[in-house]
Amino acid sequence: MEQWANQRPALARAVVTGAAGFIGSHLVESLLADGTTVVGVDRRAPGPDSVAAANLGGVLGDPNFTLITADVRTCPLTAIFRQADAVFHLAALPGVRDSWGERFTEYASCNIFATERVVAACEDARVPRLVYASSSSIYGTSSHATREVIAPNPASPYAVSKLAGEQLCLAHAGRARSELTAVALRLFTVYGPRQRPDMLIGRALTAALGGPELTLYGDGSHTRDFTYVGDVVRAAIAAATRRIGTTVLNVGAGVSTSVLDVLSAVEELTGHAVPVTRLPAQAGDVDATLADRSQAAALLDWAPRTTLIQGIAHQLSYLTADSLRP
Ligand code: NAD
């Protein structure tokens, strides 16, 4: 019995917003594999040849999975969340570069306004646990391992929007009468099969396999804490099931790797050079990110299991299998 002391029972029912996305689709698969009944909400419909259909292809026929195609800014969230043991809120507009200028209105509505709706609906529906996908971008640049207690220093409108979402979760859950506990996970550069097409590792692999040249912003000396999607999903499920209070946790592999080193790894694994077009670094691109993962280790009993080379190899297998599909 001792091993269960820190754990709530496994989730019977969960809702995943952003279910048709890169991380959301992996989370849905993992929850279903654990025996959880899952409702996914995403505004992308799984039509023929769609990203949603590709991401959710393995689970669309699963009787324990329901996909609601809807916008979290407007749909009846309280009704959707009723009876859920946990809500995982991943729906957001990701990406730093597009968040400047006119598109900020959409970033603000999808990442801030929608999060306020999600948290309020969790409270109305008496959901005990909300897990929010926050981002390492809220720290700005840092070459040393960042701890959760340091002052945020977001360097882009996207990062500001993710920090605002996180703060909304904490503000709601921190109210004296709130029955909700919220765990915001600051995710560090997630990669793996089905990675978003704007992200580095997928673009580098595609370029090495004969696709479009990789556009490299900056000289490639900038470093990231690349974190495998399967490890992120384990942390998210632990954040929903462990007996912990409202908090913020880093979810990063804790390893600093330069972009040039990633390109070398891709070249080694594919046996092909990565053709590169160089452009100057873009506003909001930070020089370095690195997680101190001691809090996630202590509270979630979490540690990454997949090395960067293993993870890139999984992503490569997915891409090559995908190109062979009829
Ligand atoms: P993704 O774009 O693949 O998935 C996001 C999903 O949210 C999409 O399917 C999109 O259709 C959906 N969505 C967006 N706005 C919506 C709305 N208003 N209503 C309904 N659905 C909506 O992105 P991802 O990389 O899987 O990221 C998932 C979450 O993790 C995001 O919150 C992102 O900010 C966060 N995050 C990702 C990373 C990373 O490296 N991928 C790092 C840090 C944080």
Image (cartoon, grey):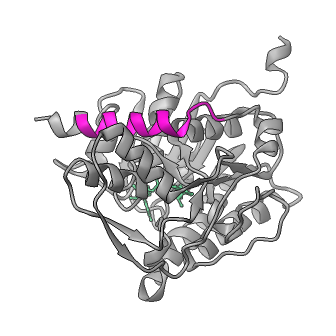
**263, above or below 106, in the image:** above
Residue closest to the eye, 119 or 50: 50
Q: Residue furthest bottom?
A: 101
- Residue 304, given in percent of the width and then of the height, sits at 64, 35
Which residue is situated farthest in the top direction here?
A: 1
The quarter of the picture where the C terminus appears is: top left
The residues colored magenta run 304-320
**Residue shown at 55% from the left, 54% from the top:** 189
Q: Foreground: 11 or 135? A: 135
User: Dividing the image into 4 quarters, which one contains the N terminus?
Assistant: top right
Q: At which x and y percent is residue 129?
A: 70, 44
Residue 110, compared with residue 250, is above or below; it is below
Q: Main secondary structure of the magenta part?
A: helix
Left or right of 274? Residue 288 is: right
Picture coordinates of residue 195, whole percent (x, y): 40, 49
In the drawing, does residue 218 fall left or right of residue 318?
right
The answer to which image quadrant residue 62 occupies is top left
